[in-house]
Amino acid sequence: MGTVIEYLNQEPWRFLVSFAAVLFLTLNLAAILTMSERKVAAYIQGRYGPNRVGPRGLLQPLADVFKLFTKENLSPSRADRWVFLAAPIAMFIPAAAIWLVVPFAPGAVVADLNIALLFFISITSIGALGVIMAGYGSRSNFALLGALRGAGQLISYEVPLILSMLGVAVLAGSLSLVDIVAAQDGGFWNWYFLPQFPMLIAFYVAGIAEIKRIPFDLPEGESEIVGGFMVEYSGMTWALIQASEFALMGLISAIGATLFFGGWQPPFEFLDFGNFNWIWFGLKAALIMFSFLWIRWTLPRLRMDQLMDFGWKILVPLTIFWLFITAGAVLAFPSVFG
Amino acid sequence: MPQLGQGVLKGMGITLKHLFEKKITRQYPEYKRELPERSRGLLTVDMDRCIACLQCMRICPDHCISIEQEKRDADGSGKAKPYAVGFVIDDSRCMYCSLCVEVCPVNCIYHTEEFEAQAYNRLELARQFGERPVDPTVDPKPAVKKKKKPAKNAPKTEDQRAATVQRAVTEKDEAT
Amino acid sequence: MGVTLPQSDPQGRPEHYLEGFRNRHGLEESGVEGNVVTLVVNPNIVPAVLATARECLQIMHLSYITVVDRVGSFELTYELLDLRGVSVRVKTAIEGEEPVIDTVTGIYPTANWHEREAYDMFGVAFKGHPDMRRVYMWQDHFDHHPLLKSFEISTKRTFEGLR
Amino acid sequence: MLEQERVAESAALSGRATERLTNPYLRNEFGLETIDLNVGPQHPAMHGLLRLILELDGETVVRCDTVMGYLHRCQEKIAENRMYPAVIPLTDRLDYFANMHMEHGYCLAVEDMLDVEIPPRADAIRVLMCELMRLASHLPSTGFLMLELGAFTPILYAFRERERIQNIFEAVTGARMMFHYLRIGGVKADLPADIPERIWEYVESLEANLQRDFVDLIEGNEIFVARTRGVGRMSQEKAVEIGVTGPALRCTGVDFDIRRDYPYSWYPNVEFDVITDTGGDVEAGYRVRIGEIKQSIRIVKQVLEKLPEGEVMGDVSRRIRPPEGEGFGRVESPRGEFAVHVVSDGSDVPYRVHYRDPSFVNMQLLQEILPGHYLPDVIAIMGLIDPVSGGWDK
């Protein structure tokens, strides 16, 4: 048995097996998150949520996936077919690809890139492209409005997202996520959310805008443009877009947990589980995911001009200001900030 | 933003409180709520008390009650009194307004607590109460005319349509 | 900036309104019972009567316009409220099949859709109306006016949905 | 004369559509490159079946045209072919979010013609039922406003409260929405014995829930304030000019309420004050509705305390045959002034019934104040007017 693992550890197989594992993780995460979203929404609103399929409703994701498989993939007659069908794929790429650089446990990372943060930023912008392709491809006024809103929002909220992550990179001195997590070991007082608290808020808000969830729900303005860029999709294409949205939500919370809450570092020394530290990583990511769900079922939606003002006039100045403070602190007290 | 987010946080606090509260939805098929005493469900007719006065047929706004009346000496008192041979209530048209229940002199038509009226064919929704099935597809509108006895059901014009209807009605009789 | 409304007890106001109308226009009939002033007016001077109601007597609110098809002639009732307990009913009768009367949207803009509905349902045309279109029915190929007494409703039951 | 105008009009409309198809960069008369957005009859925020043809320049509305009639059943024609008591179940289906007020309006109109004396207990029960109906209508309309702004939770709390009121209605009238409880001359049946305590208990619990689930959750929320303050602002002259009534008018400051200015039924015996606001925008509309919920709770409590004894049905003959003439009824429904004008020709079938529905008249606001707003504001302004498609389509 041991030799098989060594054999698999060689380069060609190791990448294939880990990529299959990552894809498996992304799709399952999307399914579980749809189920948990409906359950959290129901519990907030005083009802039970899905509890008919399987014990207490746990097989509901399976039922959803099976339903979406059997649904017909319609595409509007005047739609630009290739762009219409390429859009969900373009949206799914960031959700699947970025898991490669996320450190789950000590030594358990698919590809330890030393420019992991740069990789994360460049791949998420493909998602913005996917939204525009979906909106333009479906040739309907609602989709067009949704796409233009999506373009404006996603691209202009990448700026505060990047700036908020720079603070952590300045502190850790490297762009690789493994080094960032390593730099946060020791108790939770070493984690970066304490020195970088405003950056955490900016990252969190820009993260919500990046995954297009309420209160930054405008590309898919449910009650105004009835589903925005997703309005003409059905069946598996729609399922792919929903899966990518939920996987991206899981991803943003995973990256947030890695950057600000010390990835798989235990909060106290004695709670260290060695190789099983991925439990801490999962717990932190799950808490952030729950907060996304919790916000979605409480707040109303912003308007496009307010969304832009909030992004450019409040988040960007805040992050730039705090970036200077961090950089100044690192220069002034090199010993303290490593 | 006018304030600094207290309103948003207060709202979040309320939804978090709701997260742990007891749920209020009832699981319908397993738990059926007992309906209050006056609730108006499907209509039913107590045929032996019905004196075929056709009041309910006249007052019904949607013309869903159709009665075939005959002179018959049912209780052996010598005199032939009107007797309801055919009585149909077309549930696909009834709006449960209970005007018929109020207008019936002998209170033989009343609401039950049954509310699940579903059928695969709109004709099955027409429930027959008398001996002879009455054709629900003909509008008993003449019943509303003043002082004139309601005309017999209008003769059928399109035979072909009536044939299909008759077949559907007889089919239902064999099924029950 | 605000809208000034008369004070709340409608004591002498109906008579005051009646005086206002009587000495400005020749009324065919007029009467006051309770808080309601009823005027019967010649159709041509309806806009003038409503203009005095709006400007001179400060009656701000036109509640509705009712058209009654008296087979051969149409009876219009304009119900005006002064928002403080007194209502004024201006009644006119128009003869003939193709009824035409002047619009009052200039005086009470709220009459816009009331008149469109009257046109849609009865065919009463209002001269000078900004966009005289049907409100409920579809524009083309529906040349009937449903609420006329001559428009028969059919109670034939359609059962093509039979399986 | 009018035929040509109508044909020309529809030709112009279809002409513009084909012209736009051939030349997409067409500029309209303001020199703007606009797109036509069909916020169509089937849309989550159109309060029923309404089609708004919005001409958008980017997201700003340039022109708005409303197309109605998708739920038009021509109730007035049906009412002309039914006996007087048989029209009452019809009026439930007019504004299906304020059924009791619709029945009340029609019954008042017919009683105006018959000189029947309605027993005080029947009047008190009518006011009690109408105020409960106002609660069951204002609560979901606040929930719909939040749903249209994007928050999915308040609508569930609103319908939880409405379900409890509907259970009370079911115990009293027999039905949850289409009551058919009022009769010409009184009420169908007296209140069951346990109902007054049950209503009192419910109204007490509603006050607590109202503060927690509606006022705290919504009032201070920055996003709600940002989305509603200053949106759909209208001056008092404009509102009165367009004939707006109800909460949409009171939110501009004009204190006109039919229950106080044109008193009917049992309202003179209860005290309540008319809630007005000065904002004239969507947030003011929300505040007026919350204030009116509190006033309705106050009225329900007063009616329950002073419920007079006596029978519930006036002496009305079984076949209602009013003398030739006209009857008028005017009621303050949760959306505004609902008036009924019944013309009778002596037979037992009304000659003409005309309904003045508040949603129909308030909807004229859309064409006046929409140009200049963004698309999401259009949906918020629909929340301010809160029309019901059964009402404007009759």
Image (cartoon, coloured by chain):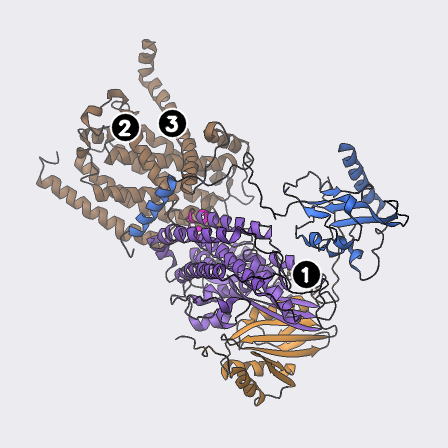
User: What range is drawn magenta here?
Assistant: D146-156
Question: Separation of disc 1 and disc 3 at Cα?
Answer: 66 Å
Which amino acid type is marked by label 3? Leu
Which amino acid type is marked by label 2? Trp
Labelled pair 1, 3 in contact (Cβ < 8 Å): no
Q: What quarter of the picture does the N terminus of chain C occupy?
A: bottom left
In this view, the mark in front (1 or 2): 1
Q: Is residue D154 part of the magenta span, yes or no?
A: yes
Percent coordinates x, y for residue B16 in the rendering: 35, 42
Q: Colour of chain D?
A: purple
Q: Nearer the viewer, residue D174 or B74?
A: B74
Q: Is residue A83 left or right of residue B86?
A: left
Q: Which chain is orange?
A: C
Label 1: element kind: helix
Label 3: element kind: helix
Q: Can you identify the residue that label 2 sits on?
A: A280
Question: Separation of disc 2 and disc 3 at Cα?
Answer: 17 Å
Q: Can you identify the residue that label 1 sits on?
A: D85
Q: Which chain is brown?
A: A
Q: Which chain is blue?
A: B
Q: Residues within 10 Å of mark 1 (few under 14, many from 20)?
A: many
Q: Is residue D24 left or right of residue A125?
A: right
Q: Can you identify the residue that label 3 sits on?
A: A25
The chain identifier of the residue carrying mark 2 reads A
